[in-house]
Image (cartoon, rainbow, N blue to C red):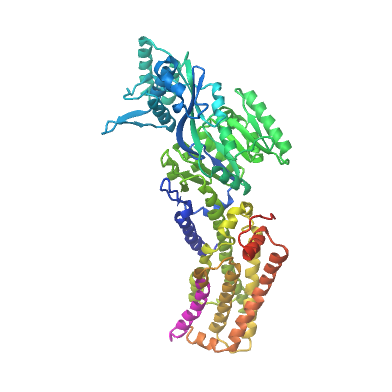
Amino acid sequence: MIPISIKVSLDFVKSLYAKFIDWDEEMYDHETDTPAHAANTAISEDLGQVEYILTDKTGTLTENKMIFRRCCIGGTFYGNESGDALRDVELLNAVANNSHVIKFLTVMTLCNTVIPIKSSSGAILYKAQSQDEDALVNAASNLHMVLVNKNGNTAGQRIKTFVDAVDKYAQLGLRTLCLGWRELESEEYLEWSRSFKEANSALIDREWKVAEVCQKLEHSLEILGVSAIEDRLQAGVPETIEILRQSGINFWMLTGDKQSTAIQIALLCNLISSEPKGQLLYINGRTVDEVARSLERVLLTMRITTSEPKELAFVVDGWALEIILSRYNEAFTELAALSKTAICCRVTPSQKAQLVKLLKSCDYRTLAIGDGGNDVRMIQQADIGVGISGREGLQAARAADYSVGKFRFLKRLILVHGRYSYNRTAFLSQYSFYKSLLICFIQILFSFLSGIAGTSLFNSVSLMAYNVFYTSIPVLTTVLDKDLSEKTVMQNPEILLYCQAGRLLNPSTFAGWFGRSLYHAIVVFLITVHAYANEKSEMEELSMVALSGSIWLQAFVVTLEMNSFTFVQFLAIWGNFIAFYIINFFISSIPSAGMYTIMFRLCRQPTYWVTLLLISGVGMGPVLALKYFRYTYRPSAINILQKAERSRGPMYTLICP
């Protein structure tokens, strides 16, 4: 039986957890004027138990600010020395008379979805669906190839191809695009245009038919060159990933980019380590048999080297992944459980969601983070979805449980808000059972004393006030409790392992609270009954003594379990303790009440105060002794950090348990 008070208390504190995230000024992005926001108030504690983070690359790890840096046209490299092709004198001179450069810029200007818009001042502005296209068209404009007007039916819109020659730029972490062209006869174009219109107006399989028609046109192209666009990492990304990996969280990067670019970005952001510390295992192949052999080889390597300190990560592309998920799902699931890091390239939005589902099937707590519409399915599939309010719009942020302005805020969201929420929820939920079981056990013991007569020791008003007021208000102050300072938590991310392992809320800890409630019930009942056995006491007097003893124990238990004290906490615990007596004095002054004069008579009796002191001493003595023994002789890593904070401030080195 679950006490209804736990539902009310948890709903209240969880709404406060969400507000703490909304109010956190350290998670406010001044660049975009974007605060953090919690759209889901039910899963804040799950943030502290995240085991896998699946992240998009472009716009999530990177700024999504595309800058045209280098290009290779007709075999000539531009921008290699300066790192900025637009300032390369050789390219600027070639624009006027080099036919290859002119063709290259023409294709770069026309083959896109960019729409030119003329402003009231006469300046031409570009509206682009893609940041890459915007960077390419603006770069061409700076090189005097200006897009002024465009027919919406431009045939060359889909003319593009990618080749292996772009690896040189990809190894620098640049986004690459290979440009090509060919001349069309008017008859060929007219025939293709009719086919394209028919495919584009189809009601069934429209995308497939359009792609098929375009493929008929995109052949025999003359390669003009390769463009290279820089998309810088966001500030704080490498440090954030490094700290979260230290906390025991595994990372998977899911991106639509090519393999070499994704690997270079993964190296730059500390997602993977370079040789000899780390090793990449590639799953590739174009046929089912090739992919199967590659997967088997990688899985065998993972099994053999799992115990070695070397960091292993596997790399897989969308083509191989499609084969694996349809034919070798069981083997890939085993690989997912063995690997801490993965790079998945050229993946589709549906494949991203499938990978999240696969990790969830292994009972891992997953968090997915992205910034664009193609990340929505992944975000919604994960246990926790985080959206970045980026340049690709607010689709991801609106679909997510949490939204942040930058990736680096994920560190604070998990380590501070997630960990504190888990700790507080673990205590509150178990304490709610404890206080309810305490009264239940006292009632059970009294039923034996009364001969199983079914009589309640406590009246209905006392029972209602006990759950709603006397014991609920103090425990709600746990939302302010911090076992360690935020600075210490951020400097020692390893302590998140306690939350991931569920050490504060599990059958063992629940059994401890169950045993405490039974012991305290026995103490309250036996001491109360024996203290008033020879007194000519009324039933209401015995009830009030037992209730008072329970309230005293509650106050001491909450005080003992608190790690930090604020004025609000002090007022809630001990102010509520005083309010208990004020309320009962008031009720005892009402002649028509069943408790008339009860509290006045009890407070004048030395027996009453001695009984309560004895209940508190006997009830809390073993609890204090056990807590002292653990803190002194068997301290956890958290206890060690607490000692260090009390002695000399935040501790920088964690002694792991």
Q: Is residue 63 above or below residue 18?
A: above
Q: Residue visible at 51% across and 65% down?
A: 5
- What quarter of the picture does the N terminus occupy? bottom right
Camera-side residue: 534 or 353? 353
Q: Where is residue 223? Give x, y as percent.
A: 48, 17
Give the side of residue 637 with respect to residue 159, left or right.
right
476 relative position to 327: left or right: left
Can residue 454 be seen in the rendering of this structure? no
Q: Is residue 263 left or right of residue 278?
A: left
Q: Quadrant of residue 513?
A: bottom right
Residue located at (43% from left, 86% from top):
591
Residue 568 part of the magenta-drawn span: no
Q: Quick one: which residue is furthest to the left in this view?
A: 120
Position of residue 371 measured from the top left corner of the image (x, y, whole percent) = 46, 40
Q: Majority secondary structure of the magenta segment? A: helix
Quarter of the C terminus within the rendering: bottom right
**Residue 16 on image: x %, y %:** 47, 59
Asked if residue 50 is positioned above or below residue 462 in the image, the reply reads above
Magenta stretch encompasses residue 581: yes
Per the rendered image, the range of residues in magenta is 571-593
Residue found at x 55% / y 59%: 425
